[in-house]
Amino acid sequence: MARRQLQAGEVLFQEHDAGDVAYLVERGRIRVSLRGTDSAVTLADLGPGDLVGEMALIDNAPRTATAVALEDTALLVIDRGHLAERIAQTDPIVRALLGGQIKRYRAALATLQGGAAPDQSLGTDDAAAVAKIRLESQLREALDGGRLQMHLQPLLDIPTGKIAGYEALIRWDHPERGPISPLEFITLAEETSLIVPVGQFMLQEAISALVTMRSRGMAQLPFLSINVSARQLREADLIQSLLERLGDAALPASAVKLEITESQVLDYPHTAEVLDACRAAGIRVALDDFGTGFSNLSHLSALAFDTVKIDQAFLRGVEGSSRAAMMLDAIVGLVRATGADALAEGVETPEQLQTLRRLGVRYAQGYLIGKPEPLARALQAQGA
Ligand code: C2E
Ligand code: CA
Ligand code: CA
Ligand code: CA
């Protein structure tokens, strides 16, 4: 690391100098002041252990103050590059907040000096971060205000031709933007702990839907397949609280299935533990979006899933292309070899369903079978 030595009275940097490094005072004293007006205003006197000029590490803007040594002083130079990686790794929202604070501080200093305030408008990164903060707080409001909804999409049991279960999919009708894709707001919720109450909401909705279905006297109670995110899976009491909810409603554990995605399986020891707990309790587990992530086939063989959901990408083009059909055939074979049932997502045409039947796929999900809809509509469709 580079060092700098200053004698008493020597200037370290002054207003408008390029700001690309900060300093750590090792010995001596530095005075930071504003010199714009007739009389200088002292902002701070700094000594050993203090940082000087550190704002530049974050925004790389010109200096807004002057730093002068009050006595013989030794400094350690902290290059922007040293921190660049750390700064890049911080949450973009935190980065934007910090950047905003610094802009405001610099503007206040400029005003003190009698100059024009620098441009305080947000850059595009900052604007995106603020939009996220906004969406997140609106999601929180929607959750508290009961404006999130659960829709159900039917899962066809191909051999019997009956609806065996439903996937529970979250819906948010945003007051200004209209329906927002869960891909957008679930990702956002996953970045914070907001996914936990959102996930609990879906569990509660699923249980109450099952209670309604049972009260309608459906001949055989369908199962509800619930998406759980990585963050939820790490909650120690997820399975326990699910079992309690089921118990309170006098529902069997077989009434729910949990869907977890491939990326979550990468945390192998933990996933294995959760799967064991589910198996012991009688809760079935599906591996979601199979084939889209970082497929680790050894995990697929080591972890016992009840169902493997083959991503809809593999169904596209199976009618036209023999290569696509061969791929699908091979994947179904792989899934069945692990002892799991295969489910094909995104089934949109009778020809696709025919192909799945021929390949021995157990379940089909897609617009051909039914779109996701509110519970009442799903019940109507089943004549319940
Ligand atoms: P996913 O788990 O893969 O869910 C299936 C997605 O495919 C759903 O999108 C569904 O509406 C859509 N889909 C179903 N059939 C067809 C079809 O025939 N053609 C086409 N093109 N699409 C079809 P959706 O509802 O937009 O959900 C997107 C993703 O958001 C889900 O993907 C899931 O990863 C996530 N998600 C949804 N609800 C929840 C939830 O309650 N919790 C969590 N953690 N994630 C959720
Ligand atoms: Ca799913
Ligand atoms: Ca899926
Ligand atoms: Ca998907």
Image: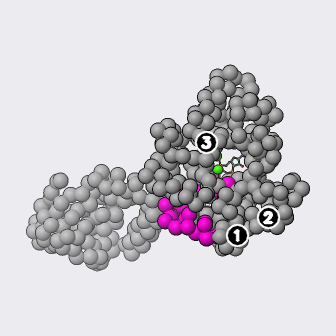
User: Residue at image x 41%, y 70%?
Assistant: 105
Residue located beneath label 1 in the image:
250
- Disc 3 to disc 2, C-alpha distance: 27 Å
Q: Earlier in the sequence, mark 3 or mark 1?
A: 1
Q: Residue 340 carries which label?
A: 3
Q: In this view, does 382 lie to the left or right of 113?
A: right
Query: Does 72 appear above or below 333?
Result: below
Q: Which amino acid does label 1 sit on?
A: Ala
> What is the crowding at mark 1: few (fewer than 14 residues within 10 Å), some, or many (at least 20)?
few
Q: What residue type is labelled 2?
A: Arg
Residue located beneath label 2 in the image:
214
Give the extent of the magenta segment.
225-245
Q: Does the magenta stretch include residue 227?
A: yes
Q: Is residue 232 magenta?
A: yes
Q: Residue furthest top?
A: 322
Q: Earlier in the sequence, mark 3 or mark 2?
A: 2
User: Residue at image x 21%, y 58%?
Assistant: 77
Residue 21 position, x and y percent, is 27, 57
| SS at mark 3 in the image | loop
Q: State the predominant SS element of the stretch in magenta.
A: helix
| SS at mark 1 in the image | loop
Q: How many labels does the image show?
A: 3
Quarter holding residue 313: top right
Residue 128 position, x and y percent, is 55, 57
Q: Are marks 3 and 2 in contact (CB under 8 Å)?
A: no
> Quick one: quadrant of the C terminus?
bottom right
